[in-house]
Image: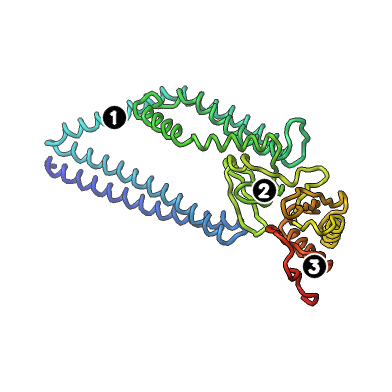
């Protein structure tokens, strides 16, 4: 058989082989995608939420499609490379070029294999460090979770400090593991790796000044045990029930049902915690009455108004004191203890209404805060008002 005819037959056979290879990969890809689609739908059926089920199935299908398509592209490129080199070997004019390409490819492949083999001991050390960090993470995680869920009692931690310490210990374990494992990572000595490390360090140093301050203020609040979720507190930015103590800020739910997020430094600067008193915290409200009204009468009226207000505790009993003797009036202060500090604003509104009712019924004028003298007509509403 002539040489040129043999070359043509070989080229045709190689082309048919390439077409067959592409067809097999394409059909296999379709079959794999269909099976992965069915598997994703079946795996997502266990999720109760329909929205989360749809999102989970879509996410799994996206990952499976990306992996399958990437693998199919690599196989196609490999087939095209083999076809191109074999075709160049069949043609006498390009045979030497084909062999040069093959040598270059195998040299690169060999160098990659040697690099991967030389990196195996370091990767084994990294895996061992990861294993130790994972064991320590699981141990401390379960220990502090047991304290946080009140399954175990501790002399050093309560549920709130245990939850915070668990997060701090987790962060510390993985930072130490990363620092120890860093020299053993492949490419850790390269210029690119060093450049990324310098950039990350610069970003952290520039952006962490305020963050570290907020973080340390939060630690002082938590470990000083001056603040706990569920406490009713007052800060310079507002007051409310503590819902969550985060890393850099506290979240409060105000009496007006407002959601407040206040940085730890602001909370620590002017914190008043109304839930930490053993016998209950005492609130105060003031009235100013003229000197012509007997102070005993004013005292009895204020105590009667407190007794008329539901939500004010009888033990300890309300107390009236003369806070100041001003130029034109006496400043009286009513101290009382609410059943629930979180109801302070609503309780004050009801108490103020009862104070007005008692004083108006008794014919005593309230001229706060600018009492200068008795007017010609008493400033008291009508009886039927």
Please, what secondary structure does the residue beneath circle 3 have? helix
Which is more N-terminal, label 1 or label 3? 1
Residue drawn at (80%, 47%), measured in percent from left and top? 280
Badge 2 marks a residue whose secondary structure is strand
- Name the one closer to the observer, 247 or 93: 247
Please determine whether, in this image, residue 54 is positioned above or below residue 383.
Answer: above
> In this orientation, which residue lies closer to the viewer: 115 or 156?
156
Q: Nearer the viewer, mark 3 or mark 2?
A: 3
- In this figure, which colouring scheme has been used for the structure? rainbow
Residue behind mark 3: 360
Q: x and y percent of residue 136 in the render?
A: 63, 29
Circles 3 and 1 in contact, beta carbons < 8 Å: no
Task: Please state, as top left, top right, bottom left or bottom right, where the N terminus lies in the image.
Answer: top left
Q: Considering only order in the chain, which callout, 2 or 3, is on the residue closer to the N terminus?
A: 2
Q: Where residue 106 is drawn, which disc sits there?
A: 1
Q: Which mark is residue 234?
A: 2
Find residue 264 and report its horizontal and vertical position in percent.
59, 41
Q: Please identify the residue farthest to the bottom as the structure is shown.
A: 384
Where residue 249 sits, quadrant-wise, is top right
- Is 349 situated left or right of 4 in this image? right
């Amino acid at each position: 058989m002539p040489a040129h005819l043999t070359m043509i037959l070989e080229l045709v056979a190689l082309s048919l082989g390439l077409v067959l290879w592409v067809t097999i990969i394409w059909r296999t890809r379709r079959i794999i995608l269909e099976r992965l689609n069915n598997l994703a739908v079946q795996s997502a059926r266990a999720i109760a939420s329909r929205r989360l089920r749809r999102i989970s199935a879509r996410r799994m299908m996206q990952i499976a499609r990306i992996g399958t398509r990437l693998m199919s592209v690599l196989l196609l490129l490999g087939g095209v490379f083999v076809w191109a080199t074999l075709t160049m070997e069949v043609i006498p004019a390009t045979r030497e070029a084909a062999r040069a390409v093959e040598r270059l490819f195998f040299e690169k492949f060999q160098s990659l294999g040697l690099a991967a083999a030389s990196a195996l001991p370091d990767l084994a050390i990294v895996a061992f460090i990861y294993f130790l960090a994972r064991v320590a993470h699981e141990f401390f995680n379960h220990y502090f979770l047991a304290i946080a869920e009140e399954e175990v009692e501790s002399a050093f931690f309560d549920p709130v400090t245990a939850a915070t310490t668990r997060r701090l210990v987790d962060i510390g374990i993985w930072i130490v593991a990363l620092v120890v494992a860093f020299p053993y990572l492949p490419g850790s000595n390269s210029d690119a790796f060093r450049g990324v490390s310098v950039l990350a360090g610069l970003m952290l140093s520039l952006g962490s000044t305020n963050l570290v301050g907020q973080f340390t203020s939060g630690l002082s609040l938590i470990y000083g045990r001056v603040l706990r979720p569920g406490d009713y507190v007052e800060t310079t930015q507002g007051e409310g029930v503590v819902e969550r103590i985060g890393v850099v800020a506290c979240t409060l739910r105000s009496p007006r049902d407002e959601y407040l997020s206040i940085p730890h430094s602001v909370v620590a600067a002017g914190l008043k915690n109304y839930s930490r008193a053993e016998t209950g915290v005492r609130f105060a409200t003031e009235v100013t009455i003229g000197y012509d009204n007997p102070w005993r009468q004013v005292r009895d009226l204020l105590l009667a108004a407190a007794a008329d207000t539901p939500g004010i505790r009888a033990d300890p009993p309300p107390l009236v004191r003369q806070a100041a003797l001003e130029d034109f009036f006496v400043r009286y202060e009513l101290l009382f203890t609410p059943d629930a500090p979180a109801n302070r604003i609503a309780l004050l509104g009801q108490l103020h209404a009862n104070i007005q009712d008692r004083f108006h019924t008794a014919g005593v004028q309230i001229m706060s805060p600018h009492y200068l003298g008795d007017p010609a007509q008493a400033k008291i509403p009508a009886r039927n008002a």
